[in-house]
Amino acid sequence: MFINNVDQCQWIRQKFETPGIMQFTNAEKRTLLARLVRSTRFEDFLARKWSSEKRFGLEGCEVLIPALKTIIDKSSAAGIDSVIMGMPHRGRLNVLANVVRKDLDQIFCQFDPKLEAADEGSGDVKYHLGMYHERINRETDKNITLSLMANPSHLEAVDPVVQGKAKAEQFYRGDTQGKKVMSILMHGDAAFAGQGVVYETFHLSELPSYTTHGTVHVVVNNQVCYRRFGHNEMDEPMFTQPLMYKQIRRQEHVLKKYSDKLIAEGVVTLQEFEEEVAKYDKICEEAYTSSKDEKILHIRHWLDSPWPDFFTAEGEPKSMSCPPTGLDEEVLQHIGQTASSVPLEDFKIHTGVSRILRGRADLVKKRQMDWALGEYMAFGSLLKDGTHVRLSGQDVERGTFSHRHHVLHDQEVDKRFCVPMNHLWSNQAPYTVCNSSLSEYGVLGFELGFAMASPNALILWEAQFGDFHNTAQCIIDQFISPGQAKWVRNNGIVLLLPHGMEGMGPEHSSARPERFLQMSKDDPDRFPEFSGDFEVQQLYDCNWIVVNCSTPANYCHVLRRQILLPFRKPLIIFTPKSLLRHPDARSSFDDLATDTKFRRLIPDEGPASQSPGQVKRVIFCTGKVYYELAKERKQQNVESDIAIIRLEQISPFPFDLVRAEVEKYSNAELIWCQEEHKNMGYYDYVRPRFLTVVANKKPIWYVGRDPAAAPATGNKSTHLNELKRFMDTAFNLSAFQGRNF
């Protein structure tokens, strides 16, 4: 909002600004001048040496550097020892050089076109990179850690990520009031006013499990400060703003104005000022000379969230294997009993919740688990081992489908509640389960930032319905999918996306698996070499893991594997809705026994597997549709003729296990069956990989819904008719006879 009324502006100033706050001592004025020299001469140096390179310089707002350094000085004096910053690209190199204090030769070598990239992924442009540095603050003589987060050209996307990382650091340090760790966010005035994620981030500011107890926002107002050049140094702003830029070119530089003022006041002499300029120019020239020795670009040197104890000194995993993810019977029983009881006395719970807990207790007696109990086993066992678990999203405390109930509310005492998961063991790690604001973009960014702070935490974000990640797509596309390739930054965040076609309409059915699979970087046309621990090596090579578990035990295993792996990758889980209460979607405690692990593929274990040579058709599928196929196969009495195999881990594709199944049923035709439409779901991803497995010698036929524009119908009758049609095709053994491959 622009206010044109001087009286109104004065009123705001009087309300917000302390009188006399801008009165500086002579020593403070000299410090400001020295900082302004560095800010200005840094940009001048880059402009001289690399006149035709984009750098998104700070010309016109050089005062940002002394402003930031003053904020950090005052914060350090007040007891802050860790500052996490986020900013767009304008002025980033200057902030890296003069605030975070990255070595100048490391910055300058980034401009060398002959610099060869280390084998660390794609890398990113220099004005997107981050940095982490611990140093002494000269003004306070105290240690301070500065972290500038890497972020893409989506100007404000980094805001919630910074807040999440700041919250995590506060949480792990027990800084409950934000007295040790703080965040600073920089914005352009247009982006600050115009981009919705700014508001989504503000929205989190007072929520208990999200507040960082205040953030300093620095808005670089281009109406007050200005851009001496256009959007970047290659722009010609005179094309569109001729009068304004004529005025800008007449502006005297802020360094000239301020140095003249201090010389006139007798605070510094002209000679002292010129010596300060010459001193910094010499530093830049020496760094420029030494930057010529750099031949290899290492993005590792620009990490904003190092995990020093998790990897080796070279940043490599300490092993390339994963232990079994099963659990002791005693642990399963203990977690099961806690999950089905109320640990506090005189605590009156809702009758509906009582019924759910009784149901859980019955399952535990039978040594069985449903989906909610499988999740309880995963979380509870990790807490026992000292791993913090944080589950965040809209309505996650009870679960969108009222299946979880991790927070129990006393029905007679207002605001009295209990989290049984925090009463499992005496010395367990804490469990944080928190309902978020009604936001996806901001909250997913926040959880991503939280997951950056420590590798020894399971951080999960659950969408209310799977396709609600639509509005967080920027975080997924810019940070989660390519984050390691661009910034060499491991992240173990888990996305729980409820998915399944149940006739609920186009906005509550599909979590859009096709989008995640399209962004998976494994090669469909190359059969990978089987060496070492193939499963772990595949996970190490991928950019993220995509699974659709059909059993509670497998869901538990994959969550535990996420932490037991010697590295971190994002994990995308398509979670069920109707299967949450499906009587067949149960697991035995035996499926979680000590020597068990996640099953990337679940083979047919019925009559078909006893006589594989007699099997006429093998149906491969994933997720909920398995239960519909199994029911139809039983009704049609073709359990010996047709095998049904579940792909639980879709990406990276389990080439080894699929090949074994295809070879086992060598006489059978191959089908891929999915409930999603043909242009969605998994088909476009799995088809070329199946053809690679069979060396293009036989087809894999598609069974499922026809292509469509919307992800699902909104009409229940149409939904059921579509389901019947493709079930009929799945079990019609002559459906593909005479068809050309």
Image (cartoon, rainbow, N blue to C red):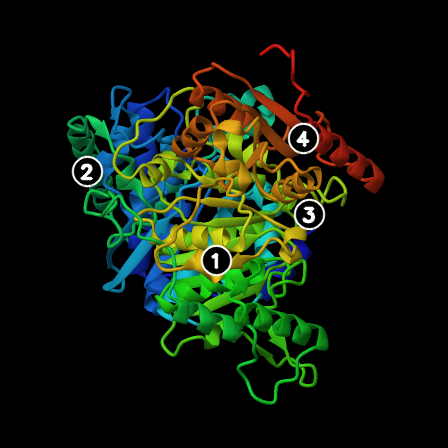
Q: Position of residue 259 (x, y in %)?
A: 33, 45
How far separated are the C-alphas under marks 4 and 1? 63 Å
* Front one among 668 and 34: 668
* Front one among 226 and 204: 204
Q: Which quadrant would the C terminus be assigned to in this image?
A: top right
The disc label shown at residue 4, or none: 3
The disc label shown at residue 216, or none: 1
Q: Are marks 4 and 2 in contact (CB under 8 Å)?
A: no
707 lies above or below 319: above
How far separated are the C-alphas under marks 1 and 3? 26 Å
Q: Are marks 3 and 4 in contact (CB under 8 Å)?
A: no
**The residue under label 1 is which amino acid type?**
Val
Which of pointers 3 and 4 indicates the residue nearer the eye?
4
Q: Position of residue 5 (x, y in %)?
A: 69, 51
* Label whose residue precedes the other's in the sequence (1 or 2): 1
* Label whose residue precedes the other's in the sequence (4 or 1): 1
Q: Position of residue 708 (x, y in %)?
A: 73, 27
| Relative side of 68 to 278, left or right | right
Report helix, strand or loop for mark 1. strand
* Label whose residue precedes the other's in the sequence (4 or 2): 2
| Relative side of 680 to 310, left or right | right
* Label whose residue precedes the other's in the sequence (3 or 4): 3
Q: Which residue is mark 2?
A: 283
Q: Which residue is mark 4?
A: 731
